Amino acid sequence: MKVFKIPEYYKSRIITPIKEFRRKKDKLKRDYSPTVLDLGAVKFLIARHFGFCYGVENAIEIAYKALDANPDKRIFLLSEMIHNPDVNGDLIDRGVRFLMDTKGNRILDWDILTSEDIVIVPAFGTTLEIQEELASRGVDIHAYDTTCPFVEKVWNRAAQIGQKDYTIVVHGKPQHEETRATFSHSKENAPTVIVRDLEQTKLLARYIRGELPAGQFYDDFSGLYSDGFDPVRDLQRIGVVNQTTMLASDTQEIADYLRSVMIEHFNLQPDQTEERFANTRDTLCYATNDNQDATYALLENEADLVIVAGGYNSSNTSHLVELCERVLPTYFIASAEKITDRETICHYDLKQKREMMTRGFLPKGKSPVIMLTCGASCPDAILEQILLKITSFYEDALPLDEVLAAEIDAQTAS
């Protein structure tokens, strides 16, 4: 397993050792039970998998190498490297400038770039059109490309099935950087259409069955299809790939649904399925799957509330929040600073898309049980700060270092 060099201030003296211990003890990832830190006055259940994934650590290492290796050059990021305000804020403080926002709107004009400038491609990747724009100005687009290998895996799989005359159905959020990049790469090899969710997928199925007039497709899927897309011609053979940070269960549900539609509509026998529907199960991101599976396992336990840490525009984090909200009161926060005191927490509401203040989030008259997890772009240090902030509200809490040591000893002996 590759070990990346990332700044020490993103690590944690509490969280990082827990993750490393669990990784060594459970190399095959068969144990999804949470780590328990019982401080007496308050108990924490920490998810088995969370925090920086391979792609994020790779991106951070490359970005900071760019800073170290080019002290006298201007350094730009295409957009947020990852969806975490602390990481992006630190890069800005070090002089990195953003060329675009997360929706693809330009902040700076392309014309300011020269061949001497450094441009970092974010972990989400970028479109072929932007690559061409940078290359036309002499920018080396490969020198500091932090595109996640698992995103590139999706692009490669889309190219492979596109070359076999399948149309690509991308499950993703149309405005997300990764989906825009995947769509751009996919449409070079095959007709491509984006679906946001199962409801929109069911609408697409009506065009597969010929239930709706072909001309209406262009209104129903405005901005979501490649140039020259013909719903009559291009929905005869399909394959599904995804934005890697979507809920794996949602992508699988969409793929299974479209597979059944193709089987029924074209009256396929079991051994004929791949004549119409490509097998693309191998495009699901392992880190997204691990974090989601660990969250399901976390929620099998009893607790009073869940705190999920991460950037508010982080897709993979928002899906963890959605899972938790189905079971327990859940607070989505960017950092420990959002916890004002023992009574008050400022958290992000996914439905209203804004921060809101809640008082009395910690139960009174009992020792609370709190679940903790975070997204794939959230540093361990953030989760540690949240844990310490809450612990500070309980003067009679047991010493954290002693509890941590005891928990590791107990797991070692088990």
Image (spheres, rainbow, N blue to C red):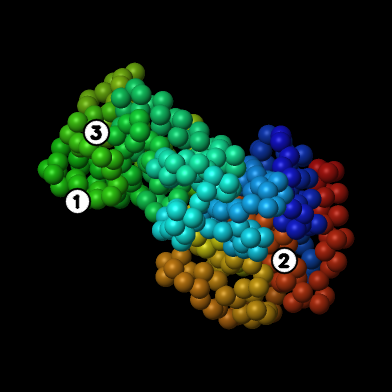
Residue shown at 51%/69% (left/top)?
Answer: 348
Closest to the observer, 173 or 359: 173
Residue shown at 22%/50% (left/top)?
Answer: 220
| Mark 1, secondary structure of its residue | helix
Label 3 neighbourhood size at 10 Å, few (<14), some (14-19), many (20+)? many
Position of residue 261 in the picture relative to residue 176 (left or right): left
Residue shown at 83%/44% (left/top)?
Answer: 412
Name the quarter where the N terminus is drawn.
Answer: top right
| Labelled pair 3, 1 in contact (Cβ < 8 Å) | no
Q: Mark 2 = which residue?
A: 385
Q: Indicate the amino acid at tag 2.
A: Gln
Q: Indicate the amino acid at tag 1.
A: Asp
Looking at marks 3 and 1 on the same chain, the residue that comes earlier in the sequence is marked by 1
Closest to the observer, 266 or 188: 188
The answer for how far apart the CA atoms under marks 3 and 1 are is 17 Å
The spot of residue 252 in percent (x, y) is 42, 40
Instruction: Choose top left, top right, bottom left or bottom right for residue 14.
Output: bottom right
